[in-house]
Amino acid sequence: MLLPGNLGGANWEGGAFDPETGVLYVGSWTSPALLALVKDPQRSDMDWVGGGGQTPRVRGLPIIKPPYSRITAIDLNTGDHAWMVASGDTPAAIKNNPALAGLTIPPTGAQSRPVILATKTMLFTAEGSSGQPILRALDKKTGETIAQIPLPGAVGSVPMTYAVGGRQFIALWVADRMSELPGTLVALALPGPAQGRGGGGAGDVR
């Protein structure tokens, strides 16, 4: 068995770095893989490492300790972990498992690889392509969730940010396999003064 998995804990989604504080934010997922030597004379005269089947579970639950996915803030000035939080709530299949009936467990994090975006004052994160359709804003200093923004589908890309006319936007790709929502580009921003926020809007999501 290979842990955190044959694709690693953090993959193409990468991390987010704050040059002002020297803190690196990394999203990671622990998804064990079962590998074994494969022999197929029709394809090769050598054995090679391939998939060895499903990883073991106990009463339908993963055999590893949660959080399954997490976001870690690493202070590159000292090398210390400033904080670590689970990436998202507990998946329904685990939360509703009869083996956990009557137990109160902290969020385990989604069973998917999180994506993150650091702005000047906040850290935006989503659970990834197989997670819940929610964009979260976290406090960069503590990892505490400040806001949860529902989306039409799960986030399948790293969010990006840009400004137009002094108003800041966050854009990301979402999709929903259950409702067959195709890949859709979503751009978010706070209402500007013309939408009734008085003096707010332009830089409020930074």
Image (spheres, rainbow, N blue to C red):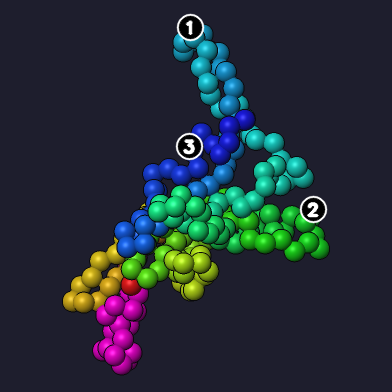
Residue interval drawn in magenta: 180-205
- In the image, what residue type sits under mark 1? Asp
User: Would you identify the image quadrant in which residue 181 lies?
Assistant: bottom left
Q: Which mark is residue 99?
A: 2
Say which element carries label 3. loop
Residue 69, above or below 199: above
Say which element carries label 2. helix
Q: Which mark is residue 7?
A: 3
Alpha carbon separation for disc pair 3 and 2: 29 Å
- In the rendered structure, which disc, 3 or 2, sits on the residue that comes first in sequence? 3
> Could you say which is closer to the camera, residue 126 or residue 120?
120
Residue 135, position as x, y percentages in the image: 45, 66
172 left or right of 100 in image = left
Q: Which residue is mark 1?
A: 45
Residue 157, position as x, y percentages in the image: 38, 54
Alpha carbon separation for disc pair 3 and 1: 26 Å
Say which element carries label 1. loop
Alpha carbon separation for disc pair 2 and 1: 46 Å
Residue at the image position 67 percent from the left and 43 percent from the top: 64
1 left or right of 101 in image = left
- In the rendered structure, which disc, 3 or 1, sits on the residue that comes first in sequence? 3
Residue 97, above or below 60: below
Q: Residues within 10 Å of mark 3 (few under 14, many from 20)?
A: some
